[in-house]
């Protein structure tokens, strides 16, 4: 259960009152996540982090009234700053294949502005990638909002990517980003809810977004690994998606974190076993230089 009650509000009295009211309405004395919502500017984050809101959230967590402290944001710069402080345990963040190509900003409307999709967009915004990988490295779980872009991504006419995706493809995209633990699905009707719930039993072919994303007219992920797994099978048994994910974690960090080294060591087959046969590159819909990535991973991890 998530308590969506603690706001980045200057009046801590109202925050306390609102939270108590919500516990009362929910008929509980504990919620799993105390979420500090809608922190999209650095100024707001500074106010939250250094003021009474964060102090109150920590007090609630210490008392066991909330299990974790969460923060919701649409701005990767703010989210990254928050995650790097170690003050938050959970991040609610807007993740979808259109937002992911947009640069950081404080105005959420800019993420959807048609002018920002007039020219072809190429590859994920580096700050967003750094955010996801930092969350994974530090163990901050991401719960996704706006996976369907308010429904626009599901519409042939409204999608800024120039072509509709399905709900299952959007969900699978979000759930396969590093550190993502869950998606808060928006639903206008019961049918919408059923369409999202169908993800649980859907076959891989219906979840698969790789071909659909590779064919989007206005967006390109050329050379960027989406961890989709289409390059499998490797004759040496290397899990290319996993090895690439660990490599990218280290690239984002500029070093090899011990936890990443340990996870990499658990792979049954590692990049050093790559014989550069190129079979995987022929199957990759995004033109990722896999042989070079495996060479770099082998050099980095020494195996
Ligand atoms: S290398 Fe290509 S096919 Fe393999 S996981 Fe990455 S994007 Fe998918
Ligand atoms: S190039 Fe390397 S990683 Fe790719 S299929 Fe061949 S052996 Fe496997």
Image (cartoon, rainbow, N blue to C red):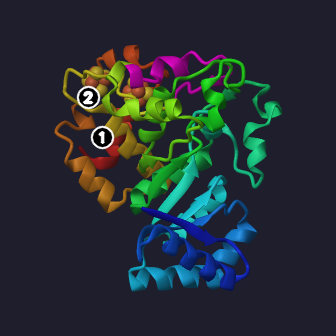
Q: In this view, does 180 lie above or below 65?
A: above
For this orientation, the residue located farthest to the left is 268
Q: Where is residue 297 in the image (x, y as percent from the top left)?
A: 34, 41
Q: Is residue 290 visible?
A: no
Closer to us: 264 or 74: 74
Residue 298, numbered label: 1
Assess disc 1: are there few (<14), some (14-19) or many (≥20) residues with their C-alpha within 10 Å of its C-alpha. Answer: some
| Disc 2 within 8 angstroms of ligand 2 (CB) | yes
Q: What is the distance, in whole Å, between disc 2 and disc 1 at their CAs?
A: 9 Å
Q: Nearer the viewer, residue 75 or 34?
A: 34
Look at the picture and state if 230 lies above or below 129: above
In the depicted structure, whether residue 43 falls above or below residue 263: below
Tell me where residue 298 appears, x and y as whole percent: 30, 40
Rendering quarter of residue 12? bottom right
**Residue, x 54% and y 56% (percent of image)?**
92
Residue at horizontal 42 percent and vertical 48 percent from the top: 182
The residue beneath circle 2 is 274
């Amino acid at each position: 259960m998530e308590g969506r009650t603690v706001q980045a509000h200057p009046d801590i009295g109202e925050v306390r009152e609102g939270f108590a009211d919500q516990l009362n309405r929910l008929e509980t004395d504990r919620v799993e996540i105390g979420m500090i919502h809608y922190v999209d500017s650095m100024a707001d984050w500074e106010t939250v982090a250094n003021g009474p809101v964060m102090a109150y959230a920590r007090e609630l967590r210490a008392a066991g009234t909330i299990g974790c402290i969460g923060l919701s944001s649409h701005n990767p710069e703010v989210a990254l700053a928050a995650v790097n402080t170690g003050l938050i345990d959970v991040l609610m963040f807007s993740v979808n294949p259109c937002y992911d190509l947009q640069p950081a900003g404080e105005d959420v409307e800019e993420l959807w502005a048609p002018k920002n999709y007039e020219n072809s967009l190429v590859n994920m915004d580096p700050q967003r990638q750094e955010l996801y990988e930092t969350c994974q490295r530090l163990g901050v779980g991401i719960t996704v909002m706006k996976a369907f872009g308010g429904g626009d991504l599901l519409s042939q006419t409204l999608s800024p990517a120039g072509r509709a995706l399905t709900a299952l493809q959007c969900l699978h995209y979000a759930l396969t980003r590093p550190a993502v633990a869950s998606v808060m699905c928006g639903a206008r009707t019961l049918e919408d809810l059923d369409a999202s719930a169908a993800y649980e039993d859907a076959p891989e072919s219906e979840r698969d977004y790789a071909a659909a994303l590779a064919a989007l007219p206005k967006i390109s992920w050329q050379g960027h690994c989406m961890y989709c797994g289409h390059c499998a099978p490797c004759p040496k048994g290397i899990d290319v998606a996993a090895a690439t994910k660990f490599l990218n974690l280290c690239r984002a960090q500029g070093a090899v974190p011990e936890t990443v080294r340990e996870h990499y060591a658990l792979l049954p087959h590692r990049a050093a076993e790559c014989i550069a046969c190129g079979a995987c590159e022929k199957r990759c819909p995004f033109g990722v230089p896999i042989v070079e990535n495996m060479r770099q991973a082998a050099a980095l991890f020494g195996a």
